Amino acid sequence: MSLVNGLPAHILLVHFVVVLVPLTALALVVCAAWPRAAQRMGVVLPLLALVTLVSVPLTTGAGEWLEGHVESNALVRRHAELGDGLLPWVMGLFVLAAVVWWATGRAAVSGSGGSVRGPGSAMPVRVAAVVLSLAVAAGGVVDVYRIGDSGAKAAWQDGFSKTSAGGGDDD
């Protein structure tokens, strides 16, 4: 995918990634920490993570096309390098979302309802899921921020005037 309605597809698709990665990260952490939230969310959690996972290679592919159609400089190259690092984080979000969804469904079928009491408790597994979810969610969100910041710098560096073109007040 290269152009959408005459615009580079990357500048449109990036908005999906910027919204979906933090949303998926938040949903994953909430569902890992609170089984009732995971039960209520059901299959939506892994489906959201799947849509997020699919959006990343689409966006980076469109970004690679755009990179070949703009003047190359250090900022563009840095943005492209950072963009290539997001996929592992999003894969982690997807895998953990699928595990949390599966484990929640399994607990509901067994009748434990996500209980953490009693012998053979699932508490260590839940703690591990929460810690892993927090780590992957934070990594993904921070990476999206870093990629977006580098992309904004690449797109806007020296691309605007610091004084108003209309002669109005400059704040």
Image (spheres, helix red, strand yellow):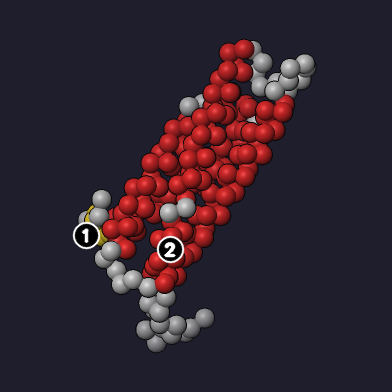
Left or right of 104 in this view: 47: left
Left or right of 29 in this view: 119: right
* Residue 64 vertical position relative to residue 108 in the rendered view, above or below: below
Considering only order in the chain, which callout, 2 or 1, is on the residue closer to the N terminus?
Answer: 1
Q: In front: mark 1 or mark 2? A: 2
Q: How many marks?
A: 2
In which image quadrant can residue 118 be found?
Answer: top right
The local crowd at label 1, few if under 14, some if 14 to 19, many if 20 or more residues have their Cα within 10 Å, is few
Relative image position of residue 79 (x, y in whole percent): 43, 63
Amino acid at the residue labelled 2:
His
Given the current orientation, which residue lies at the most extreme right position? Answer: 118
In which image quadrant can residue 152 be found?
Answer: bottom left
Foreground residue among 126 and 64: 64
Relative image position of residue 121 (x, y in whole percent): 73, 20
Given the current orientation, which residue lies at the most extreme left position? Answer: 6
Q: Secondary structure at mark 1?
A: loop
Amino acid at the residue labelled 1:
Gly
Relative image position of residue 165 (x, y in whole percent): 37, 84
**Residue 47 has which mark?**
none
Given the current orientation, which residue lies at the most extreme top position? Answer: 110
Residue on which disc 2 sits: 79
* Residue 164 vertical position relative to residue 147 in the rendered view, above or below: below
Name the residue rendered at 43%, 36% in the picture.
50
Name the residue rendered at 76%, 20% in the picture.
117
The local crowd at label 2, few if under 14, some if 14 to 19, many if 20 or more residues have their Cα within 10 Å, is many
Name the residue rendered at 77%, 16% in the picture.
119
Residue on which disc 1 sits: 6
Relative image position of residue 37 (x, y in whole percent): 60, 30
Q: Is residue 23 visible?
A: no
Name the residue rendered at 38%, 41% in the picture.
54
Cα gap from disc 1 to disc 2, whole angstroms? 23 Å
